[in-house]
């Protein structure tokens, strides 16, 4: 019971906060917003520090899971929500705060979900709650970012729900702990039972068994192949619906417009909380549930369609980031929008590599001893998952820092040009966050990419290696545009007639957020094993079932001083 209370405390605080703020209107809600956000951060921090069972624990009638992964994401989600709330200002602040809290609760539901229904409900709640605040206060009536977001979200939701319906028709379950086993049994029964034999007999030129025998064989073939026929389109639709929550191809076209027109606090929230919810959902579903060889490898596995989407995402994101533009804040907005698409491609590459390794551990090929093969596959998959989580969190931290710097610039009425001369401390924080965003050395973004590059090169899958090469080439384009923005801050002269320093009451909050995010971006890379321990605990044993002793043992071994994870 104590674990249940501890796990639900952050979500409970935010739910009550959303209800309370919904009844409050006007600026008087400022202290209430600050108190609720601080209480939610405290609850998530206590859960994170006190710790949850390494093997994970099912709570509330086995409807939700509490494990190191959920504890890590709860803390990061609440911190990103609090930072986005702090960047918000104006008469709509109370309403935006209520919507942000409600959306964060939805993201937490996706993180703690053990079945696809709860996971999708959480994603839908998070995605729909941000629609009103994206359009609030917008001056670009011709762009309508709220309408664009709603359209993209609606298409994604329709695709996802159709996929879930087909998956349920194929397996009669959407429980993540049983879905993989059900799908594996589906193909095993097809190959080893009477279904395949019936199909082979029906393909013979002559069938001397009479009409009644032919009808019986046809019934057996149809009943046996129907679940597989539902599974293949169901899996493709489900993966597409989940992937679009990261803003990947093909529903990426409206995101740059949304990023350019929506209020900065809302953009920061969508770029951190909503994207992290999508990452957590993909981790739960793919390497967490669909990790057997039949469900990972071609022709029926998910790696090939995801690899195709990842390639287009990486290429289009890098090309979009290279688009020429000036030095104003909207330019940085567009750069962040297109490069976030590129980041999503990296995340997918890491998930594919992790799935390959976990499937290899399940195959146990005869070329190696069983124990060695299993250990190599599990250890390599765990390393890939650590890289995925590290890159996702580092990107969210760097993104929040960049948006905080932009809020400061917009309130000051200035631009990026000459920022290094007019406000050197602000420029330094922006540079650190931008460098982490593009994956420069000595930053958290570089540490996450380096882990994924190593995982991709170790993987014997030619597609994964090709994706890593494409990601590295695209990274050159993204880095070139990011460094161009840094040059504008330090080399190009500032615009004449810029106003002086902004009012301290409006400036210190985004400045403080920028400073904290810049420090975290450096700490994630320079902190060594101490800063990576939470990612090790959250990523190790992802393919193992919740509550198993094997998962706890793997985490304990990984956290030992001489463990390969720590040394890497």
Image (cartoon, grey):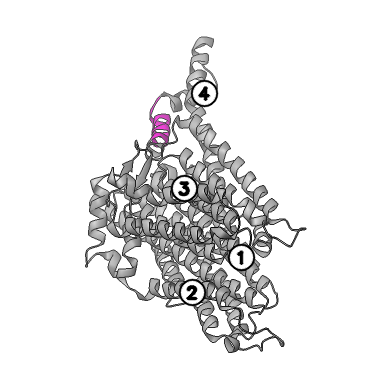
Q: Is residue 191 magenta?
A: yes
Sequence-wise first label, 1 or 4: 4
Q: Nearer the viewer, residue 280 or 316?
A: 280
Give the answer, above or below, for where 491 lies relative to 112. Answer: below
Tell which tag, 3 or 1, sits nearer the viewer: 3
The residue singled out by tag 1 in the image is 264
Q: Where is residue 568? Give x, y as percent.
A: 32, 69
The residue singled out by tag 4 in the image is 222
Q: Distance between the residues labelled 1 and 4?
A: 54 Å
Crowd around label 4: few <14 · some 14–19 · many ≥20 (10 Å): some
Q: How far apart are marks 2 and 1 (CA)?
A: 16 Å
Q: What element carries label 2?
A: helix
Sequence-wise first label, 2 or 1: 1
The residue singled out by tag 2 in the image is 512
Q: Distance between the residues labelled 2 and 4?
A: 64 Å
The residue singled out by tag 3 in the image is 16
Q: Residue at x 49, y 15 (%)?
A: 216
Q: Nearer the viewer, residue 243 or 142?
A: 142
- Number of residue marks: 4
Would residue 490 be found to the left or right of residue 221 on screen?
A: right
């Amino acid at each position: 019971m104590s674990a249940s209370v501890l796990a639900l405390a952050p979500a409970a605080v935010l739910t009550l906060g959303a209800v309370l703020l919904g009844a409050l209107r006007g600026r008087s809600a400022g202290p209430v917003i600050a108190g609720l956000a601080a209480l939610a951060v405290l609850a998530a921090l206590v859960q994170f520090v006190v710790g949850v069972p390494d093997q994970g624990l099912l709570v509330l009638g086995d409807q939700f899971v509490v494990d190191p992964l959920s504890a890590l994401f709860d803390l990061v989600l609440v911190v990103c929500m609090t930072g986005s709330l702090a960047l918000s200002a104006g008469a709509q602040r109370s309403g935006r705060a209520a919507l942000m809290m409600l959306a964060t609760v939805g993201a937490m539901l996706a993180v703690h979900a053990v079945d696809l229904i709860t996971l999708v409900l959480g994603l839908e709640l998070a995605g729909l709650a941000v629609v009103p605040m994206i359009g609030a206060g917008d001056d670009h009536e011709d762009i309508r970012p709220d309408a664009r977001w709603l359209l993209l979200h609606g298409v994604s939701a329709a695709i996802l729900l159709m996929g879930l319906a087909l998956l349920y028709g194929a397996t009669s379950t959407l429980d993540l702990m049983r879905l993989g086993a059900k799908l594996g049994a589906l193909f095993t029964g097809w190959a080893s039972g009477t279904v395949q034999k019936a199909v082979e007999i029906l393909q013979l030129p002559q069938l001397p068994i009479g009409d009644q025998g032919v009808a019986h064989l046809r019934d057996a073939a149809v009943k046996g192949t129907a679940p597989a026929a539902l599974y293949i389109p169901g899996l493709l639709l489900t993966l597409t619906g989940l992937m679009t929550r990261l803003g990947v191809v093909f529903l990426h076209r409206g995101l740059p417009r949304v990023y350019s027109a929506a209020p900065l606090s809302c953009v920061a929230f969508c770029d951190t909380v909503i994207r992290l919810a999508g990452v957590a959902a993909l981790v739960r579903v793919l390497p967490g549930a669909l990790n057997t060889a039949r469900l990972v490898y071609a022709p029926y596995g998910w790696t090939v369609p995801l690899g195709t989407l990842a390639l287009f995402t990486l290429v289009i994101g890098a090309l979009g980031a290279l688009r020429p533009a000036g030095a104003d804040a909207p330019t940085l907005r567009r750069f962040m929008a297109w490069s976030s698409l590129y980041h999503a491609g990296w995340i997918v590459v890491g998930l594919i590599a992790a799935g390959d390794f976990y499937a290899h551990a399940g195959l146990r090929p005869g070329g190696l001893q069983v124990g060695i093969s299993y250990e190599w596959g599990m250890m390599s998959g765990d390393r890939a998952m650590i890289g995925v989580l590290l890159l996702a969190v580092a990107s969210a931290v760097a993104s929040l820092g960049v948006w905080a710097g932009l809020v400061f610039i917009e309130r000051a009425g200035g631009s990026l040009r000459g920022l290094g001369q007019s406000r050197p401390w602000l420029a330094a924080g922006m540079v650190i966050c931008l460098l982490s965003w593009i994956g420069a050395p000595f930053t958290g973004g570089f540490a996450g990419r380096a882990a994924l590059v190593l995982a991709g090169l170790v993987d014997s899958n030619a597609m994964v290696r090709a994706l890593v090469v494409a990601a590295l080439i695209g990274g050159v384009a993204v880095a070139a545009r990011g460094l161009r923005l840094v040059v504008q801050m330090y080399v190009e002269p500032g615009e004449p007639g810029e106003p002086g320093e902004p009012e301290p009451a409006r400036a210190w909050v985004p400045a403080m957020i920028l400073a904290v995010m810049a420090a975290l971006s450096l700490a994630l890379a320079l902190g060594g094993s101490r800063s990576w321990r939470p990612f090790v605990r959250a990523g190790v044993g992802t393919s193992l079932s919740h509550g198993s002793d094997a998962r706890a043992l793997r985490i304990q071994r990984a956290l030992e001083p001489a463990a390969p994870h720590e040394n890497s």
